[in-house]
Amino acid sequence: MMNGKKKDITNILLVAVAMTMVLFSLAIFIEPLVAIFSGPIRNGDSEWYIAAANGNLQTLIEPYSVRFLHPFIAGWLSGHSALNVYEAFLVIAIASLLLFLIVNALILKHTIGSPLLMVPLFGLPYVLDSLSIIFHPDMFYMFLTALFFLLLSVKKQGASLLVLFFLFLTRESTILLGVMYSVVAWLCSKKNLAITIIVIMLISLFVSGVMKEIGQPNKHDLNSSVYLAAKLSYNFMRNVLGLNPWTNTYQNCDPIIQFNLPQFELFGNIRGVGVCGFNFIAPLQTLITLLTIFGIAPCALFYILKNKIKQIWKTFPFWFLVAVAYGLTSYVIGVAAGTGVQRIVGYGWPAFLLGVPILVKNFFEIDKKFIAKLFVTHLFIAWLPFVVQRIDEGQFTPVVIGVALVAYIYCFNLMKKQKQRNTCIEGRIDST
């Protein structure tokens, strides 16, 4: 028995190490990751995380001042080793990817059977992109999220709350995970746990508030609640409606329509808002992200939820309900939560990369042919935008959407035929 467990762990480690090496190699040769060996990558948000790692907390603006755990670890590692701060970020990203794969393999150990199935399941451009942006906390955040669900799946709720606290110190968007965790706990009659989660959230918000005071306010000088509402509105207009919003504090374009705002404290430094025009590419790219970021997993998830949601709620483990609820909410809200739609929608991975394999196993009598067809379609759709983007993103955007929709129809029909061919397995709930 012990030898079998050791063999399973060994196989998981081997697959995780191999996948990490392959993804890192792709990041070196395909993505601009190689640039860190000749100097720092200073673009966009990266400068803020580098400044945080170097201890310049007082220069950080919101929200970077509250995302301090990841750069703090990078700074500590750099200060206690021969690594410079850029190499420290790289080491953390690689270690986070390796641990992310190991933890997910442990969660799915009784579901996928062979750890080799981790390759088509997690070998996605989203994971590659998260590894490539080493200064961002994304890969580290994904590992902590996986650890959170592993602890929850083995009923270590106290430890999961500690990880939840660390997640808050990594990204403020953890508020969504905390809310869904507490809501599901309350609905599952775990009222004491729900109250404890709320307390952890309040403590986390207090700590984040202290760190925010050390740094600088956001560029608009808005309070946190108004800033969040404005951010969601701005990105919804841009990513979903295709409008180009403008403010006097973020003059990224020339407005064709402009309105002056009264000088209320509520509006901070914002004195004018407007619209620069329409960008039809942005909502199309958002649609591509929703259709392809997790391959055909969204199709499979919605197909099963359509018919089995009541049974899932009544019979599936608590951790699974939290994972699906959080993942689906992130998937939907992510389109309005930031300019990097793919990164933020990607936080919904627990519903699709953990939830879908478990649901497919429990509700379908699967065979090798069925799984092979699903995985081939899954990988094709996930990697299609990645390849097309390197040819001509704008020209092929409608083609990618069309191919993705055809793949979804194929997936839907494939699952429908499989359900008709085999008796749906009722009541066999995976206790993973």
Image (cartoon, grey):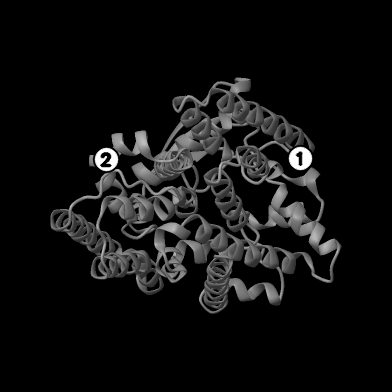
Of badges 2 and 1, the one in the foreground is 2
Q: Nearer the viewer, residue 111 or 264?
A: 111
Crowd rating for badge 2 (residues with CA inside 10 Å; few <14, some 14–19, many 20+): few
Q: Is residue 81 left or right of residue 189?
A: right
Task: Say which element carries label 1.
Answer: loop
The disc placed on residue 308 is 2
Q: Which residue is mark 1?
A: 215
- Residue 325, given in percent of the width and then of the height, sits at 42, 38
Q: Amino acid at mark 1?
A: Gly
Instruction: Say if 389 sits above or below 47 in the image.
Output: below
Q: CA distance from mark 2 to mark 1?
A: 48 Å
Q: Is residue 406 left or right of residue 157?
A: left
Q: Residue at x 26, y 40 (%)?
A: 308
Q: Residue at x 45, y 54 (%)?
A: 342
Q: Amino acid at mark 2?
A: Lys
Task: Say which element carries label 2.
Answer: helix
- Residue 380, given in percent of the width and then of the height, sits at 32, 69
Q: Residue at x 57, y 64 (%)?
A: 131
Q: Is residue 313 left or right of residue 122?
A: left
Instruction: Say if 408 sits above or below 217 in the image.
Output: below
Name the residue furthest front: 1
- Residue 418, given in percent of the width and then of the height, sits at 18, 58
Name the residue furthest right: 80
Instruction: Say if 429 sits above or below 116 in the image.
Output: above
